[in-house]
Amino acid sequence: MSNTKTPFVKKAVTCPVCNSQAENYFIMPKSFIVKSLESDRHVFEYKWLDEAFNQYHPPFYHFWHCPHCKYTATQRDFLKPGEDTSSDFGALKKVYLQMNPAQKQFVQMLGSEVDFDQMNFSMAMNLHLMAIFIRELVTAEMRDTSKVASYYLRTGWLIREQEAKKDAHGEWATYKKILEKMKKLWPEVPQFEAECLKKAAKNYEEAYQSHPRYADIIHATELMILIADIYFRAGDQVQAMKSLSSVMQTGQKFRAKQNEVIRREREAGKLSMARKAQIDAEGNRINLMMERAGDMRQEIIKKRVAQQEPRAKAVVAKLQAQGMDSEAIREKLKELKFEPQLIIKLLGEPKRKKFLGLF
């Protein structure tokens, strides 16, 4: 890399775990722009401001790495270890220095293949998986689950990008064989994008319950929408709908609380224009997120209707052949948990029951 033009700056850093010195790379600020972003925050397309850098893929360089002890983490965790409000670095350092032989063998195996001058998909995957493995050495109750979740999500993105290339005998096919070997030392190593996404969502859910960042209603709501999106992409529509329902319920409670605050402060003569504008701005952000959650719910329902329709039609045909009337069939479809919109699509709106009054 040193003999060619690159977007990188080399920085000599001290490993926060073993105190060895090593060079790591970071991308020069404002070297590229994000052209398109997917709903789970995956950058679908980058544009380097200098086309000479097109060969480099920014996500490959997200993690820093110590070539001596193989510790792997983000740039911030190397430069400012332990400074996050929920940092688990103290516990992590202790357990990392006391790894058993099998754990040491795993990080040595992955770390020995890393060369930032020749960075490729396989090396980037090694770095991502090492970062996850190291974080998960910490006991569950002490672990920074928000960080672990983001690592799993990023790993899923790498796999998504490789699968999109549809190269049957390319890097991803080769790396799948490596993953099979890894399972001997780390049985839980993720093999597919969906696995990474589900583990990301699960860790984000745990972070939602305890991480200080999500005490803020805006951040918490944004996270629940992200969790729903991740579950949806992973094919778990039930969990996605649960997350979206949580968004709607939280938003409704928040709006009711805001209205009560406005009422009390107005009655007490304490509601200034600036204060009212602040409350309205928060409310507008929540409203937008609730609208997005509503749109996602409809998207999921639409997909479920499409998936359920062939089976539902078969059930309707069978029951009609048995002489069952439409309203009885409707009740049967409800018992079988078919989507209400699908039932209406197949059988029409239910008949309104006549009110049997006294007069």
Image: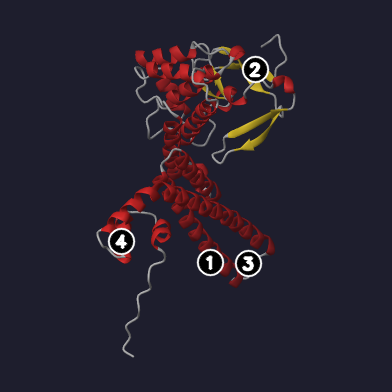
Marks 2 & 3, CB-CB < 8 Å contact: no
Q: Residue at x 53, y 13 (%)?
A: 114
Marks 4 & 1, CB-CB < 8 Å contact: no
Task: Find the distance from the CA under tag 3 to the CA under tag 1.
Answer: 13 Å
- Which numbered marker is on residue 260? 1
Q: Residue at x 63, y 56 (%)?
A: 281
Instruction: Tell me where residue 179 appears, x and y as whole percent.
Output: 41, 19
Instruction: Tell me where residue 241 appears, x and y as whole percent.
Output: 43, 49
**Earlier residue among tags 2 and 4:** 2
- Judge from the rendering whether residue 98 lies leftward or rightward of residue 57; answer left or right: left
Q: Amino acid at mark 2?
A: Lys
Colour treatment of the image:
secondary structure
Which residue lies under the disc numbered 2?
Answer: 11
Q: Nearer the viewer, mark 4 or mark 3?
A: 4
Q: Amino acid at mark 4?
A: Ile
Mark 3 nearby-residue class (10 Å; few <14, some 14–19, many ≥20): few
**Earlier residue among tags 2 and 3:** 2
Task: Find the distance from the CA under tag 1 to the CA under tag 2.
Answer: 53 Å
- Which numbered marker is on residue 270? 3
Residue 147 versus residue 75 in the image, above or below: below
Q: Secondary structure at mark 3?
A: loop
Residue 196 versus residue 323 in the image, above or below: above
- Which numbered marker is on residue 329? 4
- Judge from the rendering whether residue 180 lies leftward or rightward of residue 214; answer left or right: left
Mark 1 nearby-residue class (10 Å; few <14, some 14–19, many ≥20): few
**Earlier residue among tags 4 and 3:** 3
Q: Secondary structure at mark 2?
A: strand
Instruction: Tell me where residue 351 appears, x and y as whole percent.
Output: 37, 71
Q: Secondary structure at mark 1?
A: helix
